Amino acid sequence: MARFPYQYININGIPTIEARKVTVTDTTVDFQFNPDFDGTPFRGLLLVYLPDAIPTGTTTTLPVTFTMAGNTQTLTFAGGDAVTVADFGSIGVHIVYYDRFAGLLQLIG
Protein backbone atom coordinates (compact mmCIF):
# COMPACT_ATOMS: atom_id res chain seq x y z
CA MET A 1 0.00 0.00 0.00
CA ALA A 2 1.25 3.45 -0.84
CA ARG A 3 2.29 5.60 2.06
CA PHE A 4 0.75 8.68 0.45
CA PRO A 5 -2.36 8.93 -1.76
CA TYR A 6 -0.08 9.63 -4.76
CA GLN A 7 3.44 8.63 -5.68
CA TYR A 8 6.05 10.92 -7.15
CA ILE A 9 7.64 9.76 -10.38
CA ASN A 10 10.24 11.43 -12.55
CA ILE A 11 11.29 13.62 -9.60
CA ASN A 12 14.52 14.65 -11.33
CA GLY A 13 12.97 15.24 -14.74
CA ILE A 14 12.20 12.96 -17.66
CA PRO A 15 15.18 10.87 -18.73
CA THR A 16 16.05 10.67 -22.40
CA ILE A 17 17.53 7.54 -23.93
CA GLU A 18 18.76 7.00 -27.48
CA ALA A 19 18.58 3.80 -29.49
CA ARG A 20 22.01 2.65 -30.66
CA LYS A 21 20.88 0.04 -33.18
CA VAL A 22 17.76 -1.35 -34.83
CA THR A 23 17.63 -5.04 -35.74
CA VAL A 24 14.97 -6.75 -37.84
CA THR A 25 14.37 -10.50 -37.42
CA ASP A 26 11.61 -12.81 -38.62
CA THR A 27 9.68 -12.21 -35.39
CA THR A 28 10.44 -8.65 -34.15
CA VAL A 29 11.93 -5.25 -34.81
CA ASP A 30 14.23 -4.57 -31.88
CA PHE A 31 15.74 -1.25 -30.82
CA GLN A 32 18.84 -1.70 -28.66
CA PHE A 33 19.91 0.82 -26.04
CA ASN A 34 23.07 1.18 -23.96
CA PRO A 35 23.01 -0.66 -20.64
CA ASP A 36 20.82 0.72 -17.86
CA PHE A 37 21.35 4.42 -17.30
CA ASP A 38 21.25 4.11 -13.52
CA GLY A 39 20.94 0.41 -12.66
CA THR A 40 18.02 0.92 -10.26
CA PRO A 41 14.38 -0.04 -10.64
CA PHE A 42 12.63 2.63 -12.66
CA ARG A 43 9.03 3.73 -13.08
CA GLY A 44 7.99 6.75 -15.07
CA LEU A 45 8.11 8.55 -18.37
CA LEU A 46 10.98 8.22 -20.81
CA LEU A 47 11.75 10.28 -23.87
CA VAL A 48 13.01 7.73 -26.37
CA TYR A 49 15.05 9.05 -29.29
CA LEU A 50 15.12 6.77 -32.32
CA PRO A 51 17.69 8.15 -34.79
CA ASP A 52 17.40 5.28 -37.27
CA ALA A 53 14.31 4.36 -39.25
CA ILE A 54 13.02 0.82 -39.47
CA PRO A 55 14.42 -0.49 -42.77
CA THR A 56 12.17 -0.10 -45.80
CA GLY A 57 10.40 -3.31 -46.77
CA THR A 58 10.12 -4.61 -43.20
CA THR A 59 6.92 -6.57 -42.58
CA THR A 60 4.47 -4.11 -41.02
CA THR A 61 2.89 -6.67 -38.67
CA LEU A 62 6.11 -7.32 -36.69
CA PRO A 63 5.98 -6.19 -33.04
CA VAL A 64 8.44 -3.56 -31.80
CA THR A 65 10.71 -4.44 -28.86
CA PHE A 66 13.27 -2.52 -26.83
CA THR A 67 16.40 -4.17 -25.40
CA MET A 68 18.47 -2.65 -22.59
CA ALA A 69 20.97 -4.38 -20.30
CA GLY A 70 19.97 -7.82 -21.60
CA ASN A 71 16.26 -7.27 -20.95
CA THR A 72 13.91 -7.26 -23.94
CA GLN A 73 10.42 -5.81 -23.54
CA THR A 74 7.61 -5.59 -26.09
CA LEU A 75 6.33 -2.06 -26.66
CA THR A 76 2.55 -1.93 -26.17
CA PHE A 77 -0.38 0.43 -26.26
CA ALA A 78 -2.31 1.21 -23.07
CA GLY A 79 -4.75 -1.65 -23.75
CA GLY A 80 -1.91 -4.17 -23.96
CA ASP A 81 -1.82 -4.67 -27.74
CA ALA A 82 1.69 -4.81 -29.19
CA VAL A 83 2.92 -1.82 -31.17
CA THR A 84 3.77 -3.00 -34.69
CA VAL A 85 5.94 -1.56 -37.44
CA ALA A 86 2.78 -0.18 -39.07
CA ASP A 87 2.04 1.78 -35.88
CA PHE A 88 5.59 2.93 -35.27
CA GLY A 89 7.36 3.86 -38.46
CA SER A 90 8.88 7.23 -37.65
CA ILE A 91 12.25 8.33 -36.38
CA GLY A 92 12.48 11.03 -33.72
CA VAL A 93 11.39 11.35 -30.09
CA HIS A 94 8.63 9.18 -28.61
CA ILE A 95 7.08 9.35 -25.14
CA VAL A 96 7.00 5.99 -23.36
CA TYR A 97 5.82 4.95 -19.90
CA TYR A 98 8.05 2.29 -18.33
CA ASP A 99 7.44 0.44 -15.10
CA ARG A 100 10.18 -2.08 -14.44
CA PHE A 101 8.28 -3.47 -11.43
CA ALA A 102 5.13 -4.27 -13.46
CA GLY A 103 6.87 -5.10 -16.74
CA LEU A 104 5.08 -2.29 -18.61
CA LEU A 105 6.47 -0.51 -21.64
CA GLN A 106 3.73 1.57 -23.20
CA LEU A 107 3.81 4.03 -26.06
CA ILE A 108 2.22 7.33 -25.07
CA GLY A 109 3.06 9.49 -28.06
Image (tube, grey):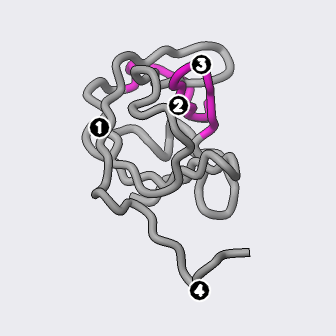
Counting residues from the start of the chain, the first of labels 4 and 1 encountered is 4
Of the 4 image quadrants, the one containing the C terminus is bottom left
Front label number (1 vs 3)? 3
Classify mark 2: helix, strand or loop.
Answer: strand
Residue 20 numbered tag: none
Counting residues from the start of the chain, the first of labels 2 and 4 encountered is 4
Give the extent of the magenta segment: 54-74
Mark 3: amino acid = Gly
Residue matched to label 4: 5
CA–CA distance between discs 1 and 3?
19 Å
Q: Position of residue 5 (x, y in %)?
A: 59, 86
**In the displayed structure, does residue 3 sit left or right of residue 68?**
right
- Residue situated furthest right in the rendering: 1
Residue matched to label 2: 66
Q: What residue lies at 39% left-to-right and 38% top-to-bottom?
A: 89
Q: Position of residue 91 (x, y in %)?
A: 29, 36
Mark 1: amino acid = Tyr
Q: Nearer the viewer, residue 1 or 21?
A: 1
CA–CA distance between discs 4 and 1?
33 Å
**In the displayed structure, does residue 65 sit left or right of residue 10?**
right
**In the displayed structure, does residue 59 sit left or right of residue 90?**
right
Q: Position of residue 90 (x, y in %)?
A: 33, 39
Residue matched to label 3: 70
Classify mark 3: helix, strand or loop.
Answer: loop
Q: Position of residue 102 (x, y in %)?
A: 70, 52
Residue 49 numbered tag: 1
Instruction: Say few, some or many: other residues with alpha carbon within 10 Å of mark 1 (under 14 / 14 to 19 / 20 or more).
Output: some
Classify mark 1: helix, strand or loop.
Answer: strand
